[in-house]
Image (cartoon, rainbow, N blue to C red):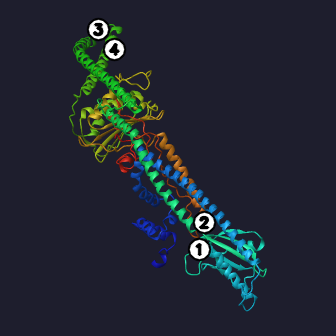
Amino acid sequence: MSLSSAAPQPGEPGARAERAAAPGHKASQVRRLLQGGRLFHDRAPGGPVPRLLMRWVRRPLLPAVRLWRRNLQLRVVAGTLLMSLGVVLLLGLVVIGQVRNGLLDAKGKAAQTQAAGGFAAAQEKANAPLTPGGQGGDAVDGTSANNSWRTELVDQLASGGKNAFNVVALSADEGTRAPRGSGSVEAASIPQSLRDSVNKGPGAFQTYSLIRYANGQEPQPGLVVGKRLYDIDHNPYQLYYLFPLTQEEKSLTLVKGTLATAGLFVVVLLGAIAWFVVRQVVTPVRMAAGIAERLSAGRLQERMKVTGEDDIARLGEAFNKMAQNLQLKIQQLEELSRMQRRFVSDVSHELRTPLTTVRMAADVIHEARSDFDPVTARSAELLGDQLDRFESLLSDLLEISRFDAGAAALEAEPIDLRQVVRRVIGGAEPLAERKGTRIRVVGDEQPVIAEVDARRVERVLRNLVVNAVEHGEGRDVVVRMAVAGGAVAVAVRDYGVGLKPGEATRVFNRFWRADPARARTTGGTGLGLSIAVEDARLHGGWLQAWGEPGGGSQFRLTLPRTADEPLRGSPIPLEPEDSRRNRESRERAAVASMTGSEHRLTAVPTQPGGNDRSSLPVPSRTPVAPRTTPVSVHPAALPGSGARVVARAAEDRPGGDFDSAVQDPERGDANRGE
């Protein structure tokens, strides 16, 4: 077989696969679709290209939409203008309709009166006897005399209303006599329906029609009134009066112009009034909003300017009174907090001297416990253990006092966090052996270098690992390390009791315990996580927590690789991939993918000589889980806590990639502290 015969021909599945795999094929296909105008025919709805076009269309409208949402005055004025325009249009239509009906009714009554007089005069003239040498005296026959009489009749009747109306006479049998008319009016101006009505009845009939002229004059609307009469020979004929509506049309045009001008003026005036009135209300509200923002920023001396005695003034007075009371309460709380911090600091320092003396005495007693009876020896051991716990609590109180006083200093230097993690795990091994827990480290294949204070970071990780072992219910504890961009992260994952909803926001509070009835086996003081979050903030980093009931918890420490460098994301997602929600999402996606693949394979007929692909595995895609929590804030902005339970997307991958929010700036980052 030659190469030419073996190559796939255009249109075959192999050729399509090769073209799809060629570099730049997708971009070239998009360009062809855009140029050919077949975009929405060749792309499925919701595909990447329609979404891109929708984004291009929506992007210029975003500022206007944002302004519409944020500006109450604009919405009120625009609504007032629209409603005013609707009212003016409705009122204008009603007025124009009434004026038009009035003009037409008046014109119809006047036309009926004028036409009735003309019909009576024509009939009287037809009933009058002919005088010698009178009508038709010079005519050759009766037909010529009748035509001459009808022409004279039309001229005589039309002479009484020059430019007011025209007269047209038509024979009952149009084939015998030509129509007679005044003012160059064409007989075609009279509708056939009116002619039929006049032939059938003895009375007068009228209708509206377009009057046409034979001399090139522009056609104009008019009222046509006709009646069947008899000439001097008692032959029936039709006499029509045509009344132009030029004057009425001018009057109606004048009324329309007047109403349009007045309506436009009224709409503009109502818009200006609405803008002025709303401004009187919105301006104090905007002022109150601005002052509230400044109060929330800590500028407690800000107050609203109050003028007058109306409702807005009373609102301003109430707002100022509230701000003043808040300032007093905050000042009292700050003073009380300073006193408490000073008390803790003073007591901690004062206790160190007696504690040192007691420690020395306890050491002497503990060394001589072999000479005591068993009860006294056990008391000496308990005394030493409780003194150790007391010293730990006192050290934690002193450290908290330094943070509260702003005296904590950072001694940062480049270190490899893997060494710190190994020291922490080595210190926690005895406790892990007693608990039956195995500590595993993930991501330590490459160096994790960062400028940090090794003592403080080791203290943070020691608290996290010890807490994970204590609450891990004897299951494995996973310590994960990762570095990406300008950040490093260490996450400690346990599979114990986990955290209930809302507890992750309080886990860093001082002396807080998830289960107060739970016994402490390691003699904790309740200040470890509070000191840990302060250490993380001192580095400019984040310490965050995630947990689910019965599914364990994960604490993530994120630090900048270089001191004083702001963080933009974390290399490790806060919610682990093995969480219950992510597992369920992956299972649903796998089932959906399998179902869709089966449908596609069933719909495609088997190709002759092709391979059976029904046994091929169908890769599953994990869909993006919906966000159920609000956008996170910087841990430093949370009072006493840098943690929260955050719903993460299922496609977040731990390791060397940033969070999805760092990759896509348009999405909110639930793992970010900003």
Closest to the camera, between mark 3 and mark 2, is 2
Instruction: Tell me the amino acid under the disc marked 1.
Output: Lys
Comes first in the chain, label 2 or label 4? 4
Comes first in the chain, label 4 or label 1? 1
Comes first in the chain, label 1 or label 2? 1
Counting from the top left corner in percent of width and height, residue 208 is at 65, 68
Instruction: Tell me the amino acid under the disc marked 3.
Output: Asp
Decide which of 638, 347 is in the foreground and name it: 638
* Residue wearing tag 1: 162
Instruction: Tell me the amino acid under the disc marked 4.
Output: Leu
Indicate which disc residue 371 carries: 3
- Taking the image as shown, residue 277 lies to the left or right of residue 113, namely left
Q: Is residue 179 visible?
A: no
Instruction: Tell me the amino acid under the disc marked 2.
Output: Pro
Indicate which disc residue 382 carries: 4
Seen in the picture, residue 173 relative to 82 is either above or below; the reply is below
Per the image, label 1 sits on a secondary structure element best described as loop
Decide which of 193, 120 is in the foreground and name it: 120
Seen in the picture, residue 65 relative to 351 is either above or below; the reply is below
Total labels drawn = 4
Residue at x-position 25% and y-position 12%: 358
Q: CA distance from mark 3 to mark 4?
A: 16 Å
Counting from the top left corner in percent of width and height, residue 29 is at 44, 67
Comes first in the chain, label 1 or label 3? 1
